[in-house]
Structure formats: structure tokens, C-alpha cells
Image: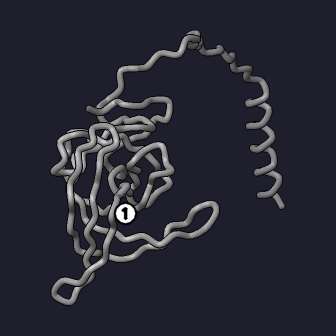
Amino acid sequence: MKKILAMFSILSFLCSCAAKQNPTVVPAVVPNAQKTATQPKSPSNIIGAIEPIYILPLKSAFYARVDTGATTSSIDVENLAHFERDGEAWVSFDIVNNRSNEKHHFEKKVIKRVKIKRIEQEEHRIKVLMDVKFGGQKMQTEFTLAERGTFDYQGLIGRNILTGRYIVDTSLSYTLK
């Protein structure tokens, strides 16, 4: 019991000391925020909502929508045809740049068929490896092949290109060359 009373006395003493202290709080000075929207000079890894991508060996760029919700990038193709080569599934297709009319015929091995979830319905697409140049970097990466004729942009840049390389600022566009 004596120990409890001693602890209570010590606790009371500490509380009374803390109550006597009156710390002065000084508000920090916050600079006025800039009220006009300006496009800041951004590091080279910040990109916008629409960016150019080169599908190699084509010489002219496609404008593509940057979509952080898409797992895999996608490109608009024409004349998609399935065939077999050495017992494996392949596809042939044409890519035509709508801005420059540049056209190239491709034959690619099918990596797999994927299910794309869309608002209205699910869609099945072919996935292939494509050589591309994006933001000055050449890479070989997966693309799904789609007939994107109803879309505003022929390409869609997904997380397979973005992750670990770029930060997306949707208030910007056309930051890459």
C-alpha cells in the first residue's frame, strides 16, 4: 500500500509540474501559394496524359493515351490474321499511322490471349512482343492488338511501360519527343 501511495504522490507531482509549464506556440510562416497555373519545369521522368510512341521500325510517332489503369499497352492494327508456324500460334497484321499514313506489315508469335475488362463487356485480345521507342528509350515489351478505330488515339501506354520509369501528371501532355 505504501508503494501505491508513493507512486501516486510522484505522479501527482509530475502532473502539477507539467500543468505549470505554458509552452508558447508560434505559428509557422507559410508563403503565399502561386495563384496562376504554370507548367513547371519537370524532370524527364514526368510525362503527361498523351505522349508519342514509336513502333519500330516505323519512322513516325503515334500519339498514345497514357493509362495507369491498363496492365498492358495496346496498339491499333488492321488486317489481323491468325496462322501457325512450326506448331505455334502466330499473327500477321498491319500498323498504319493515321497521321503520316506510314504503314508496316508485321508477323509476330502470339505470347498469349488475354481478357480485357471494359465497361460494357469483356474483350479477348492477342498479346505480342513489339519493339518500341518511348521517351528516348528503346525497349521490347508486350502489346495487345486491338482495332482501336473508335478511339481518339491509336495507342495506349500501360503499366508495363510506365512502372519504374515514369510519373504521370495528367495536367500535362506531349512532354516527350
Determine which quarter of the picture holds residue 94: bottom left
Tell me: 156 left or right of 97.
Answer: right
Q: Which residue is more in the foreground, 157 or 166?
A: 157
Residue occupying the far bottom of the picture:
87
Q: In this view, does 171 lie above or below 166?
A: above
Q: Is residue 38 above or below residue 176?
A: above
Label 1: how many Cα within 10 Å (few below 14, some 14–19, many 20+): many
| Residue at the spot 43% in from the left edge and 59% down from the top edge | 147
Q: Which residue is more in the foreground, 157 or 32?
A: 157
Residue that label 1 marks: 145
Q: Which amino acid does label 1 sit on?
A: Leu
Q: In the rendered image, which quarter contains the C terminus?
A: top left
Q: Where is residue 172 in the image (x, y as percent from the top left)?
A: 44, 29
Q: In the rendered image, which quarter contains the N terminus?
A: bottom right
| Residue at the spot 75% in from the left edge and 44% down from the top edge | 10
| Residue at the spot 74% in from the left edge and 30% down from the top edge | 17
| Residue at the spot 43% in from the left edge and 19% down from the top edge | 39
Q: Position of residue 91 (x, y in %)?
A: 27, 73
The local secondary structure at tag 1 comes to strand
Q: Which residue is more in the foreground, 132 or 24?
A: 132
Q: Position of residue 153 (x, y in %)?
A: 43, 44
Q: How many marks?
A: 1
Tell me: 34 left or right of 41.
Answer: right
Q: How is the image coloured?
A: one colour
Determine which quarter of the picture holds residue 61: top left
